[in-house]
Amino acid sequence: MESDSPNPQQSGDSAPIPSGSNERDIASRRNRLMRITQRTIDTDESGRSSSSSSNSSFDAMEDNNNEVDGRVDRDDFSAHHSPSQQQQHGLNAEELPEDEAARLFENYIRERESAATEIYNTELPTEHAYLGKMERVEGVDYLEPGKTYRLPIYSHHSIVYPGEIVPLMLNDSTLYSGRSNDSSDGLKFGLVFQNQYRDGGRVYGVTCQVYERGAEGLSALMKTVAQQRFYIVRQSQERRADVKILPEIVLPDPLISTCSNAMVRYAHSSRKDRLSTFKRLLTQTTVWPQFVYDQYDTKEVMAKVERFLSSLNITSVQTDKVKLSFWLARNIPLTEEYRKMIFCTDSVLRRMLIINKALDHMWYFICKRCESEIANYDDMFAMSKQGVQTSYCNPAGYVHDTLTVHKTKENSTLPVERPSTNFSWFPGYSWQIIVCANCRQHLGWKFVAEKKNVLPKSFYGLSGTNITVKSHGDLKKTEGEFDLTARTASNEEQLDYEELSEFDSSTDEEMY
C-alpha cells in the first residue's frame, strides 16, 4: 500500500498543475489583453482631439501605467506559476498564441458592441400608438359556430385571419348605433373580402372585436382583433348582413384514436422516442400500414415549422393548433390561391398539410405589376411581436399588410420624397416611401432608426397589396388536391358589391 502512494519529492516537474491555476492563467492573460486593447483605443481617440503638448504628457502617463500594470501582472503571474512556466508562457500579451489572441480580441470587441447597442422593443408596434389616445372597450362576444347572426359589415381588400390585430379608420359612425354604452357584449362587426371572392362562390369574412376606440364622429377610429370566420347568407339594409359562423374542426390522431382506454395513457408520453415506438407497435394491430397514418400526422410539418421559426429568431408562438394554423398562414410566404384555400378550410389538419407543402419551397418576393425580384425569403424577420407580417393603418385610413425584411435586392427599389417621423408605425424610426425601380409601383417604405445605437439600424416594410411571392420550384396544385368543392351562390347569398366597395375606392395618395 505504501509503495503505491506517489512521492511528491520524486515527482519533480511532472506533478499535476491545479485546475484553478490554469483558470487564473487564462483570466490574467485575458485581462492583460483587454487593458492593452483599451489603452490602444483610448490613445487613438485622445490623439485625434489633443494637441501635441497634451500628447507628450499623455505618453508619459501611459508609460507610467504600463510599468505599474507590468509589475502587477508579473507579481500575479509569479505567485501562481513556477519559473519554468513563466518562461514558457511569457509576461507580455504579444507573446500569446496568435489564434488565442485573436479569439480574445474578438470576444472583447463583441462585448463592447453588445453593451453599446439597444435592441428594439417589438412590443411597441403592436400598440399602434400612432393612432393617438384611445379608450378601452370592455366585453367579449363569442358567437356559436353553425348559427346565423346579423352583423354590421365592411369590406376589406385582403384576407384577415383570426387572431390578427387590425387597426381601422372607418368613414362611418353607424357602427355605434343601436349599442348602449354599458353593453357587456362588446363591439363587434364583420370584415368581408369581396375582392377575393367574385368567382360566383360564397363571400367570406371574419368577425372583429373592438378592444380600443377613438372618439365618436365622422370617422370611427378603432383597434380590433379578428376572431371567427363566416360567410354571408343574405344581405340586409343599412350595411348589415346575416352571416353564418364557420366551425374549427380539430380531428384526433387517427392511430391514437384506435387505442383502448387502457392503452391510451401510453400515447401521451413526453418522450418522442417512446411515442414513436408505441405507434409502430400499434400499427401492427391495424389494417393499414404506418405510412398511411403518417400522412395525417402533423409531426413532419411541426418539424419544418420549428426550423422556419428558428431562422426568423422567433421563440414564442401560439401553441393552440387552430391559432397556430392561422398564424402560419399569415407569416409564411404563400400564394393568394393558397391563402384563400387555408381561410376557407374548416379542418385544421388540412390547413397544416397545405402549409407543409409550402414549406418545401424556397420563395422570393416580386412586384405584382412587373414581377421584378424585390427580396428573398431568408431576408424576412419579425419587427413586431405579432410576426413578420402585420397590419398598419395610414393617415388616410388605408390598411397595409406590411412584411418586414432586412434588405431588398440591389437596385430593385428607389426611395422617393423625404424621410418623415410623422405617423410612424415603428416608434423611433423614420420612414421613406420606396417604389419599384423598374415600373415605379409603390412597394412600401424604408425605415431608419433615429438613434445610432438601436438595432436594427434600418429595414424595409413591403406592402402586401403590391407584392406577391414566387417559388423557385413551381408550387402547383395537383388534380383533386385540397379540393374545396366550388359552389354557386344562391340568391340569398348574393351581395351588393357596389355598396360595400365604397371603402375600397382609395386613391394612390391614400394608399401611400
Image (cartoon, rainbow, N blue to C red):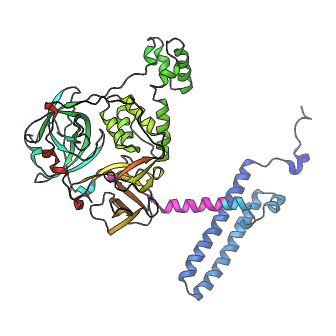
The structure residue drawn at horizontal position 73% and vertical position 67%, both measured from the top left corner, is 94
Q: Is residue 30 left or right of residue 206?
A: right
Nearer to the camera, 56 or 333? 333
Place of residue 410 in the rendered image (x, y in percent of width and height, measured from the top left): 46, 62
Q: Relative to residue 296, is residue 97 depicted above or below?
A: below
Q: Is residue 451 left or right of residue 132?
A: right
Dividing the picture into quadrants, the one containing residue 57 is bottom right
The structure residue drawn at horizontal position 86% and vertical position 48%, both measured from the top left corner, is 14
Q: Is residue 429 among what the camera can see? A: no
Nearer to the camera, 151 or 41? 151
Place of residue 441 in the rendered image (x, y in percent of width and height, measured from the top left): 32, 60
Place of residue 464 in the rendered image (x, y in percent of width and height, measured from the top left): 33, 51
Query: Which residue is most to the bottom?
Result: 53
Q: How many marks?
A: 0
* Location of the C terminus (image quadrant): bottom left
Place of residue 323 in the rendered image (x, y in percent of width and height, measured from the top left): 35, 35
Nearer to the camera, 75 or 389? 389
The structure residue drawn at horizontal position 89% and vertical position 42%, both measured from the top left corner, is 7
Q: Is residue 461 magenta?
A: no
Q: Relative to residue 463, is residue 243 depicted above or below?
A: above
The structure residue drawn at horizontal position 26% and vertical position 40%, both measured from the top left corner, is 226
Dividing the picture into quadrants, the one containing residue 80 is bottom right
The prevailing secondary structure element of the residues shown in magenta is helix
Q: Relative to residue 52, is residue 316 depicted above or below?
A: above
Which stretch is magenta?
A: 103-127
Q: Is residue 133 among what the camera can see? A: yes
* Location of the N terminus (image quadrant): top right
